[in-house]
Amino acid sequence: MRWRAAAGGFALALTPGWNVANTGAVADELAHAYGVSLAVIGLFTTGLFVTHAALQVPAGRLCDRFGARRVGAAGLVIVALASAGALAWQEAAFAIALRTVAGVGTALAFVAGSDYVRSTVGSAVAQGFYGAVSMAGGGVALALVPHWDTWRAPFASAVVVAAVGLLLVLASPPEAARPPLAARLPTIVDRRLARLAAMHAASFGLSVVLGNWVVTLLERNAGLSSGVAGAIGALVLLLGVITRPLGGRLDGHRRVLRASFLAGGAGAALLAVATPLPLALFASAVVGLAAGIPFAPSFAGAARLRPDAPGAAVGLVNMAAAVTILVATPLVGLTFSLPGDGRLGILVVAALWAATAAAVPRARP
């Protein structure tokens, strides 16, 4: 029972992670296929995160009221249908519109998956593994999608990942019955969540921004092929598989959490200047490892702070990261048209990431 629950919950993590990075993995190729600039391709991710960000708290509310498993399954269906629709017409505006619809599904799936794992498997370590699978989805997309030489690759692969995930969710057990909610749901505006939201916005949000542009950065500034750049860039998201579960064990260790933000900022700064292949490899690895550590403390801390509305609290924390991705992804894309070919944008990301060390709470939430 516990293993089936874990499989269903982790399946809900994989689809949002995959869709975060699948278009950025082939940004140059999509720009050529659609006949648009890289900034427009950045809107493929922006479109996804418009609805993904807006629906984080409502998705948590739905989980608190109707149950996470049902909400998550509905999210996967929406992602599959929207991604399949994007295969029908090679037009940028059409694809961006359907990515916006897919964002509804990723919001429902991600928040529901976290809530489902919390209510069935439990513990901060389980939340860490949930986050690891989500980050692995983005890393695997960065590594694999560039090898399919077609503009349809990001969307076709998203359909497959969502469909397989749906089968696993349907085979998973329902979570325990929840206590009935009051007619009026508790407000989720809570200043105590602000530090946790900032931590997640930097560690996850900025790592996704880097994941969307690191392949293009390495192709242009380090002279790497798309396959090699994709493999190195995948480490930015993929290595969180190791450190997100570790972050669950480090919940409450303030110094380690602060060090992870400083390391993430330093790794991102190295990526901006990385020309030799070994340095690019090292920088991507540092970013990926550092990005995973704050995930479980952020989500588990939010649920602990608001046991009256845990789904909505997690949604609020994740909304901060989603808004970060929504705003920063196209802005960093614009810096590729400035002197430095994207380096300026990556350096700004590095500075913001390192500065978030000051947001780590002084005590375990």
Image (spheres, rainbow, N blue to C red):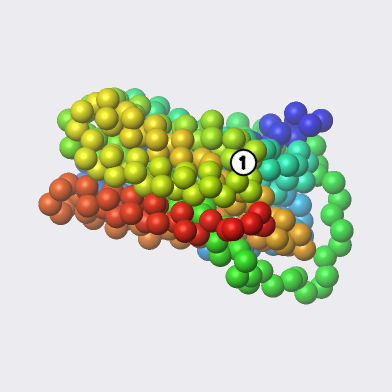
User: Is 1 placed left or right of 82 in the picture?
Assistant: right
200 in relation to 142, above or below = below
**Residue 260: x and y, percent?**
47, 44
Residue under numbered circle 1: 250
Q: Residue at x 66, y 54 (%)?
A: 364
Decide: few, some or many residues near mark 1? Use Cα within 10 Å; few <14, some 14-19, many ≥20. many
225 in relation to 138, above or below = above
Image quarter of the C terminus: bottom right
Q: Is residue 270 visible?
A: yes
Displayed quadrant of residue 335: bottom left
Given residues 181 and 202, the one toward you in this image is 202
Given residues 126 and 168, the one toward you in this image is 126
Q: Residue at x 44, y 48 (%)?
A: 261
**Residue 192: x and y, percent?**
62, 66
Image quarter of the N terminus: top right
Q: Is residue 130 visible?
A: no
User: Is 278 placed left or right of 363 in the picture?
Assistant: left
